[in-house]
Amino acid sequence: AQSVSQHNHHVILSEAASLELGCNYSYGGTVNLFWYVQYPGQHLQLLLKYFSGDPLVKGIKGFEAEFIKSKFSFNLRKPSVQWSDTAEYFCAVNARNTDKLIFGTGTRLQVFP
Amino acid sequence: GAGVSQSPSNKVTEKGKDVELRCDPISGHTALYWYRQSLGQGLEFLIYFQGNSAPDKSGLPSDRFSAERTGGSVSTLTIQRTQQEDSAVYLCASSIVAARGGKQETQYFGPGTRLLVL
């Protein structure tokens, strides 16, 4: 069965610090990969997604993620975080032959000014 | 509509009672998903509808849970004989289609219904 692991449950950073949130999945076939974000009091929204092609994906608000197939990873990065990036971040995986998204447990990011 | 809407936004019920949660997807979206978000558990897939096809119920945790989608639009998730462990945020999402050409379409989420079973 597919599963998604987000090992960082809670990350606390100061503004301007660099961010990397880990995401690993277990599935041997072709996958689509996503990062969703939930800002306080708001809906879950798509941050970025990978289907194929360049493994380095650019998303909104300066976020990027890199798909490393050999490591089954899709880590999220941002070179300099802002207070407004405080949110919960969810990695999700979809196997190409299914219609379901499998989500990780989420990482709560707190950024202090 | 402008986005996925869900009602009620909050529901408090007593153990053993039945509850109904409603989801209005984005107009024109044929795929509709229900998830459950429990504290520290991430998002757990419950059920998915795609057009007129039979729903994928593989994520429903017990036979107390059921869902239907009328006219390919509004969906209702019903929990019978609620238990305290059913307390969670229930999220609905919709997408244009479930998948096209091997690509999972972006899912748009509603605000959720926060259910508390006392």
Image (cartoon, coloured by chain):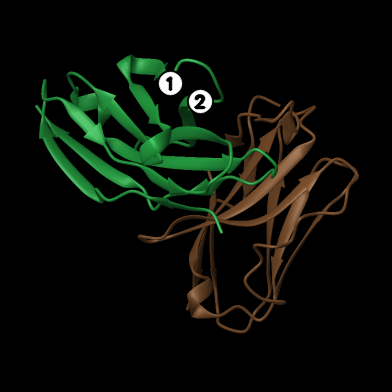
Left or right of B13, for residue A90: left
- Expressed as whole percent of the image width and height from the top left, the position of residue A1 reads 56, 59
Image quadrant where one finds the N terminus of chain B: top right
Viewer-nearest residue: A47 or B67: A47
Mark 1 Cα shell of 10 Å, populated few (<14), some (14-19), many (≥20): some
Q: Are marks 1 and 2 in contact (CB under 8 Å)?
A: yes
Q: Amino acid at mark 1?
A: Pro
The reply to whether residue B92 is in sight is yes
Q: Colour of chain B?
A: brown
- Expressed as whole percent of the image width and height from the top left, the position of residue A26 reads 46, 51
Q: Amino acid at mark 2?
A: Tyr
- Local SS, label 1: loop
- Read off the residue under disc 2: A50
- Work out whether A38 lies above or below A2: above
Left or right of B75, for residue B52: right
- Read off the residue under disc 1: A55
